[in-house]
Image (cartoon, grey):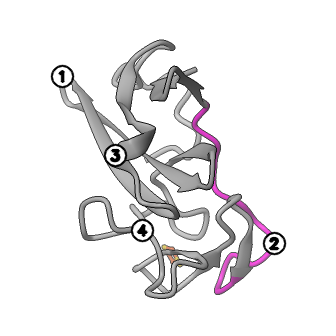
Amino acid sequence: MARSEPDNPARPPPGVRLCAVADLADPGTKGFRFREGQRLFAGFVVRQGETVRGFVDSCPHAGWPLSGLPDRYLTRDDRHILCAGHGALFRLSGECVAGPCVGDRLTNWPVEIRDGEVFTA
Ligand code: FES
């Protein structure tokens, strides 16, 4: 899976509604999968207060999806995003702070909030 996938036909265009901000715990995460033919785009969003960030669901270490569980991307203490592959930890802003890809970061998947709803941007 390519990390940024700008040319992936399954990647949704800007303006697609993902969820309501209120659907997300604070902090909390939610994963999304989009299909186009044989192609899959996987992304997830992270809420932290009134901020919601989106990331491509692909670890910078080996390109694997981060979580084996739907919507569950955070450590038990909710302080970091966890890659279940080899245990990399990421700040909620996407920087890797522990594990095999320290210093790297998750690929942004731009999202925006409009009237309490999260949309692709
Ligand atoms: S694939 Fe994420 S830490 Fe190895």
Label 2 secondary element: loop
Quadrant showing the C terminus: top right
Q: Nearer the viewer, mark 4 or mark 3?
A: 3
* Foreground label between 1 and 3: 3
The residue segment tinted magenta is 98-110
- N-terminal of the pair, mark 4 or mark 3, is 3
Q: Earlier in the sequence, mark 2 or mark 3?
A: 3
Residue with the most extreme right position? 103
Mark 3 element type: helix
Q: Is residue 26 above or below residue 85?
A: above
Disc number placed over residue 37 in the picture, else none: 1
- Which residue is disc 4 drawn over? 73
State the SS at label 4: loop
Q: Is residue 121 magenta?
A: no
Q: How dense is the environment of label 2, judged by Cα within 10 Å: few (below 14), some, or many (20 and up)?
A: few
Q: Earlier in the sequence, mark 2 or mark 1?
A: 1
Residue found 42% across the figure and 57% down from its top = 29
Name the amino acid, label 4.
Answer: Tyr
* Mark 4 surroundings within 10 Å by alpha-carbon count, few (fewer than 14), some (14 through 19), many (20 or more): many
Residue 73 location, x and y as percent?
Answer: 42, 68
Q: Residues within 10 Å of mark 3 (few under 14, many from 20)?
A: some
Please state the horizontal and vertical placement of residue 18, each as a whole percent of the image.
36, 30
Whether label 3 lies within 8 Å of ligand 1 gets the answer: no
**Mark 1 vs ligand 1: CB below 8 Å:** no
Residue under pointer 3: 23
Q: Residue furthest left?
A: 37
| Spatial CA span between label 1 and label 3 | 29 Å
Label 1, residues with CA under 10 Å away: few <14, some 14-19, many ≥20: few
